[in-house]
């Protein structure tokens, strides 16, 4: 997202693997064991994969809200309250800014995810050279360890495109971002190649907003939208290491209207892929 640390920077404290995540994982495992459930038995009851539950228990994944909501029926009220108390202690996830955590959890479970970007290529579509070019230019500068943590976290987020084949991903990106040349020719080549690869995925649609488009509905800036598994939509915007989650139905409806309009104003999926191929060839 727009900010280098979030969807599209944070202080040194964000670089450490959160002890709270590990603690939450230990608590979840203890409660699961107390209920005499294996991971293979517990996972389908809370509607997550066994691998995902294992990573949460290892402190490697931020627990989604759905897990907390569904655990009560499986583990019981008292255990659920203990789990909720452990969740409240979660302060940070390695490589992800604290202000981005809530959206990252929503992103993990979304059944539809829309993104419009006019400042940087969306984080889910960035190849590693592009990420490094962004983080190299971050102010205040990052330490080497901070940079590596952020790259690792962003690469990890991109697994969603492959691990959630039933989630519909839609991206609208400004053509100017492709022609900016951030990081030089090699970085731009890697970016174009990555967009062409990601754009071939059945659940991913990439559209380019042409440089000249007098009927443009994106004047309010970059925005993200997600549809939850309960078919509710939430919006998200960020800038300058700050963010806002938008849940008001009226405001989210307006965002959906703008996004729908921009989909009709941008190049079609096929035309966008052709443009990317032409730019790569050039």
Image (tube, rainbow, N blue to C red):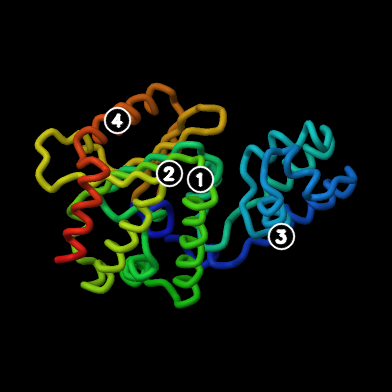
Graded by Cα atoms within 10 Å as few (under 14), some (14 to 19) or many (20 or more), the crowding at tag 4 reads few
Residue that carries the numbered disc 1 in the rendered image:
165
Name the mark on residue 260: 4
Question: Disc 2 vs disc 1: Cβ atoms closer than 8 Å?
Answer: yes
* Disc number for residue 146: none
In the rendered structure, the answer to whether residue 220 lies left or right of residue 32 reads: left
Tell me the distance, in whole angstroms, between the alpha carbons under discs 3 and 1. Answer: 24 Å
Residue 112 place in picture, x, y as percent: 45, 37
The disc, 3 or 4, on the residue closer to the chain's N-terminal end is 3
Marks 4/1: CA distance? 22 Å
User: Crowding at label 3, few (<14), some or many (≥20) Cα neighbours within 10 Å?
Assistant: some
Relative depth, front residue between 132 and 189 = 189
Camera-nearest label, 3 or 1: 1
From the image, tell me which residue sits under label 2: 203
Q: Do tag 3 and tag 1 residues touch (Cβ < 8 Å)?
A: no
For the point 58% across and 58% down, the residue is: 93
Furthest residue in direction top, as rendered: 250
Residue 74 to residue 210: above or below: above
Q: Which residue lies at the image location 50% right of the left edge and 27% below the top edge?
A: 232
Residue position for label 3: 58
Q: Alpha-carbon distance for marks 3 and 4?
A: 40 Å
Under tag 4, what secondary structure?
helix
Marks 3 and 2 sit apart, C-alpha to C-alpha, by: 29 Å
């Amino acid at each position: 997202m727009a900010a280098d640390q979030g969807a599209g920077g944070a202080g040194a404290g964000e670089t450490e693997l959160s002890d709270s995540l590990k603690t939450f994982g230990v608590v979840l495992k203890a409660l699961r064991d107390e209920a005499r459930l294996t991971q293979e038995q517990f996972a389908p009851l809370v509607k997550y994969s066994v691998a995902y539950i294992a990573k949460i228990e290892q402190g490697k994944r931020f627990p989604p809200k759905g897990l907390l909501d569904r655990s009560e029926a499986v583990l019981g009220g008292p255990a659920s309250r203990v789990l909720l108390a452990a969740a409240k202690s979660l302060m940070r996830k390695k490589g992800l800014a604290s202000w981005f955590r809530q959206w990252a959890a929503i992103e993990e479970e979304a059944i539809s995810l829309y993104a419009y970007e006019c400042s940087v290529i969306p984080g889910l579509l960035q190849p590693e050279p592009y990420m490094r070019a962004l983080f190299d230019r971050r102010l205040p500068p990052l330490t080497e360890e901070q940079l590596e943590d952020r790259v690792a976290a962003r690469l990890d987020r991109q697994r969603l495109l492959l691990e959630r084949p039933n989630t519909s991903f839609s991206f609208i990106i400004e053509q100017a971002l492709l022609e900016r040349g951030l990081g030089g020719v090699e970085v731009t080549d890697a970016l174009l190649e990555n967009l062409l690869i990601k754009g071939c995925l059945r659940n991913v649609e990439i559209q380019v907003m042409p440089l000249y488009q007098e009927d443009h509905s994106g004047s309010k800036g970059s925005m993200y939208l997600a549809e939850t598994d309960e078919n509710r939509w939430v919006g998200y915007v960020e800038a300058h290491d700050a963010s806002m989650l938008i849940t008001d139905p009226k405001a989210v409806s307006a965002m959906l209207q703008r996004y729908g309009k921009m989909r009709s104003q941008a190049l079609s999926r096929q035309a966008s892929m052709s443009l990317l191929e032409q730019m790569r060839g050039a």
